[in-house]
Image (cartoon, rainbow, N blue to C red):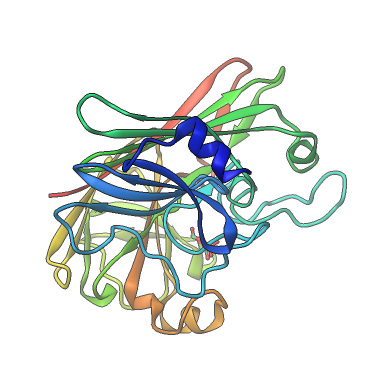
Amino acid sequence: MNIQQLNTDFGIENQILCVAGKGGLPCIQVNNAKASALISIYAGQVLSFKPVNQTEDFMFISENAYFAEGKAAKGGVPICWPWFGAATELDHITQEKKPDHGFVRTRFWSVVTAEMLDNGDTKIVLEISDTEETRKIWPYSFNLILEILISDSLTLQLTTRNTGKQPFSITEALHTYLNVGDVTQVEVLGLENTEYLDKNSGFAKAYQAGVVKIFEPTDRIHSAITHQLILADPDFNRKIKISSSGNQNVVVWNPWIEGATTVQDLDKDDYKRFICLEVANAAGHDVEIKPNCESRLKANYSVI
Ligand SMILES: O=P(O)(O)OC[C@H]1O[C@@H](O)[C@H](O)[C@@H](O)[C@@H]1O
């Protein structure tokens, strides 16, 4: 991907700049009067989002994150698609294990548009479609579009279009790594009185009565959710609201101490610095999309 050409096509002086990011991977740097953001064109991944009145980024990125082709960078908002979690079947041609969380977070996307709106927001649209290579992993034709709106808040909208002749089913997630002051002090509001599958107990069903706190390895798929979460972070003295639509699940993940020491692309203390709150369709909540139809998953992240 030619950075100079990207700037010719999409650059706007002092506001939208295409740069070679870490590992030389192409990124879009956005600065407007309301916020700044960094978006990886490889992976279609928001790596940074910071409203101008905030000192702390919304996004956590591990110092040990991989920034290389074929690898997923640990942090920001990886897009899990067309499956969330481990693939349940082997590749039908190579018989190899399919990548966890799908294949679009380790592939180059394209820029469709990058524009400043009249109200001062910036809108970036990225897309990825099937190729001969993706059809070997997942035998369907698709067009996946990520619309990113950088305003006082961050809005992400992921649209899946079935461009083929047969229906397909997906699971998916906006796998947001939210930057926190100290994960042991945060509270997640909005999941009270919901059921969840506990991945750390063999996907056993469990029930969350009160607010969610992190004090052990946590890996859950909540269902029957409301579409609003609040992440209360006393150390950063802020509350982030996450409003969503098109999702039947919310995933809460923190690897805790033992997880952070075994995951190579996390530093041992990183577990304190993030919580993943993922707007998702997962664990049996597959979305079926018929030919010429589409489905949308949307989330907005704001400080309240
Ligand atoms: O692939 P990544 O970014 O390392 O994330 C892994 C984690 O992603 C979470 O979404 C899953 O619920 C966890 O089970 C998994 O371990």
Task: Kindly tell me whether residue 158 is visible in this rendering.
Answer: no
Which residue lies at the image location 14% right of the left edge and 61% below the top edge? Answer: 238
State the residue in front, 16 or 52: 16
State the residue in front, 280 or 48: 48
User: Horizontal and vertical percent for residue 249?
Assistant: 40, 45
Task: Kindly tell me whether residue 29 is visible in this rendering.
Answer: yes
- The quadrant of the picture occupied by the N terminus is top right
Which residue lies at the image location 19% right of the left edge and 63% below the top edge? Answer: 55
Report the label total. 0
User: Horizontal and vertical percent for residue 258?
Assistant: 47, 84
Residue 27 vertical position relative to residue 70 in the rendered view, above or below: above
State the residue in front, 51 or 138: 51
**Based on the displayed image, in which of its 4 quarters is residue 170 positioned?**
top right
**Based on the displayed image, in which of its 4 quarters is residue 197 positioned?**
bottom left
> Is residue 37 shown left or right of residue 111?
left
User: Horizontal and vertical percent for residue 189?
Assistant: 20, 56
> Is residue 265 shown left or right of residue 249?
right
User: Horizontal and vertical percent for residue 211?
Assistant: 21, 61
> Is residue 35 shown left or right of residue 289?
left
Which residue lies at the image location 42% right of the left edge and 66% below the top edge? Answer: 61
> Is residue 99 shown left or right of residue 45?
right
